[in-house]
C-alpha cells in the first residue's frame, strides 16, 4: 500500500442469501479474506476484493438458518445484538437516539443504500431511519466492475444499517469522500467537522500508522482537536489483521503496526471480539478475542509509534511510552457476524453476514447517540471516562472483560511461506487485544454520562493537542 492512501478497514463478509423479506438459509464456510491486487495498486488508493460464499435461500420459520447453534457459520440480527449488549432495555425506556445525529464517513458510494436501509428495516421490524447522503467534493460515478468501489459499498451498507440498528431514531449523516485516498477522506471529515454535522463520527477504515504522510497525520490530528472542541465524539475501527497492518507498498505482506486513525489519542479505538450468544434470543454467554485464522482475520490492536502515551492511559500495566489501542471492543467475528442488506454485491436485496471491526465503530457511535439523548447533551471526548471507569469496581458491571485469546496474525508470503506476527494476549482489565472490553450498554450509559467529559473538557483536550 502506497503512502498517501487510506487502506479501508474492509468488512469481512460471507454471502448469506438473496431475499426480499429477509429469511436466510444455512451458510457454507468460505475464505472471508480481503486480498490485494498486487502490481495494480493505484498510487492514491488501495483496491480490495471481498470474498464471499453463496448460502442459498431456504427459509426456516421466523429466523435465519444461520441463527442456530448447529450452523456452520452463525449470525445475529438486530434483536440478538440488542439483547446481548443490553441495548434493548435502553430502547424500551424511550431512549432511541431521537434528536441526535451520527456522522458516518466513507468513500465512493452505495447507490442502493436508501432502499437497502428500508429493506433492512422491513426485514427486522425496525422503524425507518432519517438518512442524509452528503458528498461535499462530489461523487465518483459508481462502477460495479471496480472491486474497490464495490467493497466500499459494502462498508457503507454495514455502517449505516448497524448504526441505525442501535440508535433507530438518530439521524444518520453519511458523508462520502470522492475516493479512498487520505486527502479525500480527510476532506470529507473536515466538512463534517466544519459543519458540525453530528454528535459522533464513525470511521470504519484505517492503515498502518507509518504509511500515513506525517504532514497529513498532523492535519488529521488538528482536525480531531477541532472536532473534540465541539464535543464531537470520535470512533475508529482498530483493524482486521490483528497486531499487523498491510505493508505500505501494497506488496501483500504485513508488518507489526497499530492502525491510524484509531491510534490518535483523541479517537476511541474499537477492537474486536467473537460474541457467543444464544442465536435466537441473543442472551449473552461469553466472548473471546476475535481471531479467525480460517478467514485470515483478527481484531486489531497494538501501540502507536507517533503518539506518546496520553494522560488517560497512565497507570495501565503494559502501556509504556506510546499510545495503546484499542480502547474498547465489540463483536467483530465472521462466525457470529451481523446480517446486512447489500444490493451492490450484484444481487438486489441480497443479505450478507458481515464481520470486522468495521461493525463495531458504527455501533459504538449508535450507543453514543443513545447516551447523548439520555444526557440531553453531547458526551464529547469519551476516552478519559472509559479509563476512569476502568480503574474502578464499576468496570466489572459495565464492561464484558475479555480475558481469553490473542490477536496474533499469520499470512502466506509470495513464496508460500507462513509468516507469523506475534499478537497481544487478553488479560484482566485493559489489554492491547480488546481494550476494556465490550459494553453492557444500559449499565454503561448510567455510569458513563456522569463520568463523561461532555462540554467541560478544555484542559484535557488541550493536553493532547
Image (spheres, rainbow, N blue to C red):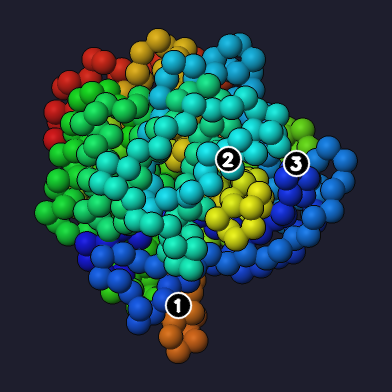
Q: Residue at x 17, y 59 (%)?
A: 213
Q: Which mark is residue 115?
A: 2
Q: Nearer the viewer, mark 2 or mark 1?
A: 2
Which of marks 3 and 1 precedes in the sequence? 3
Q: Which mark is residue 21?
A: 3
Above or below residue 385? Residue 359 is below
Q: Quadrant of the N terminus?
A: bottom left
Residue 172 position, x and y percent, is 44, 31
| Marks 2 and 1, how far apart at CA | 43 Å
Visible residue check, residue 288: no
- Name, please, the residue furthest toward the left: 215
Which of these two is toward me, 273 or 7? 7
Give the side of residue 49 with respect to residue 74, left or right: left
Identify the element where label 3 is drawn. Answer: loop
| Marks 1 and 3, how far apart at CA | 44 Å
Residue density around tag 1, few if under 14, some if 14–19, many if 20 or more, within 10 Å: some
Q: Which mark is residue 80?
A: none
Amino acid at each position: 500500500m502506497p503512502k498517501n492512501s487510506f487502506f479501508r478497514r474492509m468488512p469481512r463478509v460471507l454471502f448469506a442469501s438473496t431475499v426480499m423479506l429477509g429469511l436466510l438459509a444455512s451458510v457454507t464456510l468460505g475464505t472471508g479474506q480481503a486480498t490485494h491486487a498486487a502490481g495494480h495498486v493505484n498510487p492514491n488508493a488501495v483496491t480490495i476484493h471481498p470474498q464471499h460464499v453463496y448460502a442459498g435461500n431456504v427459509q426456516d420459520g421466523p429466523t435465519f438458518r444461520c441463527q442456530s447453534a448447529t450452523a456452520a457459520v452463525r449470525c445475529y440480527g438486530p434483536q440478538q445484538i440488542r439483547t446481548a449488549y443490553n441495548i434493548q432495555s435502553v430502547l424500551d425506556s424511550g431512549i432511541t437516539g431521537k434528536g441526535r445525529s451520527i456522522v458516518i464517513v466513507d468513500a465512493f458510494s452505495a447507490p442502493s443504500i436508501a432502499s437497502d436501509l428500508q429493506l433492512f428495516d422491513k426485514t427486522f421490524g425496525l422503524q425507518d431511519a432519517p438518512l442524509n447522503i452528503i458528498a461535499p467534493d462530489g461523487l465518483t460515478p459508481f462502477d460495479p466492475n471496480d472491486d474497490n468501489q464495490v467493497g466500499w459499498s459494502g462498508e457503507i451498507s454495514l455502517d449505516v444499517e448497524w448504526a441505525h440498528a442501535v440508535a433507530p431514531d438518530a439521524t444518520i449523516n453519511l458523508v462520502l469522500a470522492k475516493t479512498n485516498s487520505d486527502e479525500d477522506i480527510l476532506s470529507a471529515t473536515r466538512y463534517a467537522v466544519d459543519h458540525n454535522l453530528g454528535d459522533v463520527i464513525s470511521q470504519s477504515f484505517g492503515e498502518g500508522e507509518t504509511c500515513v504522510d506525517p504532514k497529513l497525520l498532523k492535519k488529521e490530528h488538528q482536525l480531531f482537536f477541532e472536532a473534540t472542541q465541539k464535543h464531537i465524539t470520535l470512533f475508529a475501527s482498530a483493524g482486521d489483521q490483528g497486531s499487523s497492518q498491510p505493508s505500505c507498498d501494497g506488496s501483500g505482506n504485513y508488518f507489526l503496526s497499530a492502525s491510524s486513525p484509531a491510534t490518535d489519542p483523541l479517537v476511541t479505538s474499537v477492537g474486536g471480539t467473537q460474541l457467543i450468544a444464544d442465536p435466537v434470543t441473543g442472551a449473552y454467554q461469553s466472548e473471546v478475542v476475535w481471531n479467525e485464522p480460517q478467514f485470515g482475520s483478527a481484531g486489531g490492536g497494538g501501540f502507536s509509534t507517533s503518539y506518546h502515551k496520553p494522560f488517560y492511559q497512565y497507570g495501565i500495566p503494559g502501556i509504556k511510552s506510546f499510545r495503546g489501542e484499542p480502547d474498547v471492543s465489540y463483536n467483530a467475528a465472521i462466525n457470529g457476524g451481523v446480517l446486512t442488506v447489500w444490493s451492490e454485491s450484484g444481487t438486489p436485496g441480497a443479505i450478507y453476514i458481515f464481520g470486522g471491526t468495521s461493525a463495531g465503530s458504527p455501533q459504538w457511535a449508535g450507543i453514543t447517540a443513545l447516551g447523548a439523548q439520555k444526557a440531553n447533551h453531547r458526551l464529547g471526548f469519551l476516552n478519559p471516562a472509559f479509563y476512569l471507569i476502568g480503574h474502578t469496581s464499576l468496570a466489572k458491571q459495565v464492561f464484558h472483560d475479555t480475558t481469553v485469546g490473542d490477536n496474533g496474525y499469520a499470512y502466506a508470503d509470495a513464496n508460500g511461506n507462513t509468516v507469523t506476527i506475534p499478537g497481544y494476549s487478553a488479560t484482566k482489565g485493559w489489554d492491547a487485544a480488546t481494550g476494556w472490553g465490550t459494553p453492557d450498554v444500559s449499565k454503561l450509559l448510567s455510569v458513563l454520562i456522569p463520568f463523561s467529559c461532555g462540554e467541560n473538557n478544555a484542559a484535557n483536550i488541550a493536553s493532547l493537542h
